[in-house]
Amino acid sequence: MTDTNEPMAVAERFIDALNHCDADAVRGIYAPDAKIWHNFDNKLQPVEENIETMKFVHSKLSDLNYDIKQRIPIPGGFVQQHVLRGTLKSGEPFGLEACAIVKVEDGRITELEEYLDTGQAKALFA
C-alpha cells in the first residue's frame, strides 16, 4: 500500500534529479520496468532511453529548470503540470508546457504518462 505522502516525496526527488541531470538518481527513482509514455509517439520508452533523453535536453539548454505549476496527489501517484524552462544555445528563452500523470509504488515511479506540445519542443532540434 502506498502512503499518500510518498508519491509527493518521490515527485520532489524526481524533479530535483531531472533538474540536475542526475542519471543515477533518476534510474533509482524509476522502477526497473517502469512504463514511460509520451503523447507524441504513443510508444513505451525504456528507462535508459528516457535517461538519454534527459541528457539530450540538458545538452541543448542551460539553466534548465522544471517550473512546477501544480502537483495534485491522486490515489497511488500524482498529476503534475509544469513548464520545462531553460536557455537555448542561441540565448533565446525556452519553455515547454507539459502535464504528467505518474503512478508510484514502494517509493518508485512505475508509470509516467507525459503530454506535451511538440511544436514547443522543435526549438530543441534546431
Image (cartoon, grey):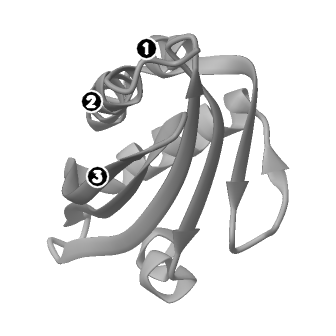
Task: Give the residue at x 27% y 73%.
Answer: 95
Task: Give the residue at x 50% y 38%.
Answer: 77
Number of residues whose C-alpha sits closer than 10 Å to that of mark 3, classed few (under 14), some (14–19) or many (20 or more): some
Q: Where is residue 99 shown, x and y percent of the image?
A: 44, 65
Numbered mark located on residue 15 in the image:
none
Q: Where is residue 113 shown, x and y percent of the image?
A: 63, 55
Q: Which residue occupies the extreme bottom position in the image?
A: 119
Mark 2 is on which residue type? Glu
- Residue at disc 2, secondary structure: helix
Please state which of residues 111 and 63 is positioned toward the viewer in this rendering: 111
Above or below: residue 21 compared with residue 50:
above
Mark 3 is on which residue type? Arg
Q: Which residue occupies the extreme right position in the image?
A: 43
Q: Earlier in the sequence, mark 1 or mark 3?
A: 1
Numbered mark located on residue 71 in the image:
3
Numbered mark located on residue 25 in the image:
1
Q: Quadrant of residue 27?
A: top right
Number of residues whose C-alpha sits closer than 10 Å to that of mark 2, classed few (under 14), some (14–19) or many (20 or more): few
Q: Earlier in the sequence, mark 1 or mark 2?
A: 2
Using the numbered discs, state the Cα–Cα distance from disc 2 to disc 3 in whole angstroms.
10 Å
Q: Quadrant of residue 10?
A: top left
Q: Earlier in the sequence, mark 2 or mark 3?
A: 2
Q: Where is residue 32 shown, x and y percent of the image?
A: 74, 16
Q: Which residue is mark 2?
A: 12
Above or below: residue 8 compared with residue 126:
above
Mark 1 is on which residue type? Ala
- Residue at disc 3, secondary structure: strand
Number of residues whose C-alpha sits closer than 10 Å to that of mark 1, classed few (under 14), some (14–19) or many (20 or more): some
